[in-house]
Amino acid sequence: MNRAAQTPVLSVRRLVVELRGDGHRTRAVDRIDFDLYAGEILALVGESGSGKSKTAEAVMGLIDPARGIVTADCIRLGDTDLHGLGESALRRIRGRDLSMVFQEPMTALDPVFSCGEQLAALYRRHRGYDRRRARQAAALMFARIGFSDPEQVMRSYPHHLSGGMRQRVIVAMALSCRPRVLIADEPTTALDVTTQARVLTQMIALAGETGTALLLITHDLGIVAQYCDRALVMRRGRLVEDAAVRDLFRAPQSPYTAELIAASRGAGA
Amino acid sequence: MSRLNRESAPAGLLAVRHLDVHYHLAGSARRMLQAVCDVSFDIRRGEILAVVGESGSGKTSLARAILGLVEPSGGTLGFDGVDLRGPGRRVAGRRIQAVFQDPLASLSPRRTVLQSVREPLDHLRIGPAPERGDRALEALETAGLDRALAGRYPHELSGGQRQRVALARAIAPRPELIVADEPLSSLDLTVQHRMVRLIRDLGARMNIAFLFISHDLSVVRQLADRVAVMYLGRFVESGPAAAIFDRPAHPYTRSLLDAVPVADPAHPRPRVPVGDAASPLTPPAGCVFHSRCEAAMPRCAEQPPTEQEIGDRTPEGTGHRASCHLWTQ
């Protein structure tokens, strides 16, 4: 792909996240620059404490000002600079142009509404569909994320479903409004390996259909190698590498990336 | 080779025979969940046996039964000639220690590292009291921790350090068997890698056997001498780790291995397996895996397969076994 000719869908420059602790400040994210291009699957790799989740939360505008300060030259989604936007403007963008999926699907679902009601509500809010049309759109979306019986999922409440099924419901919801960017933070870490393969495969296929670029946060180099186009490697708040996946595994530029690869290859499999 | 022959194996430490763990469901005296069904295996001294499977496979129930945390519904648990289900459990029990997934949950927040590691020595009255402190310090060092950390509290440590404390606590009483349930799952990759080396080293140096419960096949491949694959409460395949990973015999084992993403872009993408795991509340008739099996034949829905030796037999009798009609003549 010739990137020089392309405009990124998401462009982040000099992003800094400082967290306020008891009496001291820590720099969780330290002057990060990156671009995400249309149709791309970009991995954000790092170990715990590397700042990868804080980067995602800062892009989403989810960092509580009481707990942390976000500064940046820009966090641009298309033509809009998200940095400095007010909460009400951000709320209109989140879910519609910019979506996020977390590790634990239960926290993102409301236990008192059926999965169908929750997805239909998104179509009504963001697309202005009437009740009937929203319901049809929801059932169609569940079919597209690979449920063999979408009507049954429509009627199910979150606690009826297995972890993998819940995560697919969340992915369907996150992609329902055809966002430009989906940020998925360790979406399969809590799942079994067989379920992980299903969720990732279907999430990537559906993101392809909706034209959504994917920022996939993971600690798993296997997921990076198998599913992603390009990877950012973070360590202690800094970006230590930004490379196409093929180059990353063939000739890692940072010794830390090399160590991560060696650790996963020691893992063999 | 029959199970009876294996019972007399000289180096056998743990001998599990026909173990069942059933749970009665709340609100019904008759509905039962069969978490572990007719499981038999041995662990030899110093050997690392990994039990792998998806959530709901019964692997944690198996670990809990061996630790005496749940009462088996049937079968026998022999430990170095002692029946663990009888009065011998109290004495033999100290020779078995445990490590769990979340070290924060198993270490007291109000005890220092040294106090936590020393606690089982006091509790089990191991060695003269004045020497227990030294012994606990020694265990810390064996687990790869600096003595300088002995006065710290769990919240002052990293995840990897905490899990080393949990491991030091398990090895301090010099057990012969450690049952470890997902001990590395919450750790970062590089930390996991170092812990795997430590556990292998401990097993060899102190001749400690491990029953290692894990859903992470990459870790198991690095760590285990032998592997058992569990599905809906049954061992569907077991054998030397190399045989399981390089020549998996059971379609379920194959589907598990094919789903692991490999850290090499040239490797084929993980395969998405057929269907979700069946519920242990309503296990399918016949072979419990037939509803998800790509190689299922008519008889698989009717008749449960029996365990077959499928080659790779070694003089010690540590064969490669599978319960699958593909291997039944």
Image (spheres, coloured by chain):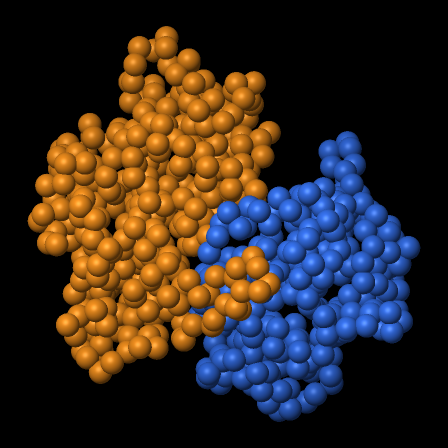
Regarding residue B72, the answer to whether it shows in the image is: no
Place residue A242 in its image quadrant. Answer: bottom right
Q: Which chain is orange?
A: B
Report the number of numbered marks. Answer: 0
Q: What residue appears at the point 41 percent right and 75 percent down from the top-left corner?
A: B274
Q: Residue B116 falls in which quadrant of the image?
A: top left
Asked if B46 appears above or below B323 in the picture, the reply is above
Left or right, B223 with respect to B282, comes to right
Q: Nearer the viewer, residue A55 or B281?
A: A55
Q: Could you say which is closer to the camera, residue A157 or residue B57?
A: B57
Q: Colour of chain A?
A: blue
Q: What residue is shown at x 52% (from left), y 59% (from top)?
A: B262
Q: In this rendering, is residue A250 above or below B8?
A: below
Residue visible at 61% across and 77% down in the picture: A205
Determine whether, in the image, residue B20 is placed left or right of residue A90: left
Image position, residue B83 (x, y; %): 13, 38
Q: In the current view of this chain or complex, which residue is farthest to the top? A: B130
Q: Between residues B50 and B149, which one lies in front from this camera angle? A: B50
Residue B100 in the image: state x and y as whole percent. Answer: 41, 41
Whether residue A99 is visible to the viewer of this picture, yes or no, is yes
Side of A232 where B186 appears, left or right = left
- In the rendered image, residue A34, in percent from the top left (x then y), is placed at 80, 58
Q: Classify A139 as above or below B271.
A: below
Which of these two is toward me, A200 or B245? B245
Is residue A58 depicted above or below B141 in this figure?
below
Residue lying at 56% horizontally and 69% vertically, measured from the top left: A200
| Rendered-image quadrant of the C terminus of chain B | bottom left
Q: Locate residue B180, reporting x and y percent.
A: 37, 41
Residue B277 image-quadrant placement: bottom left
Considering the image in quadrants, where does the N terminus of chain B appear? bottom left
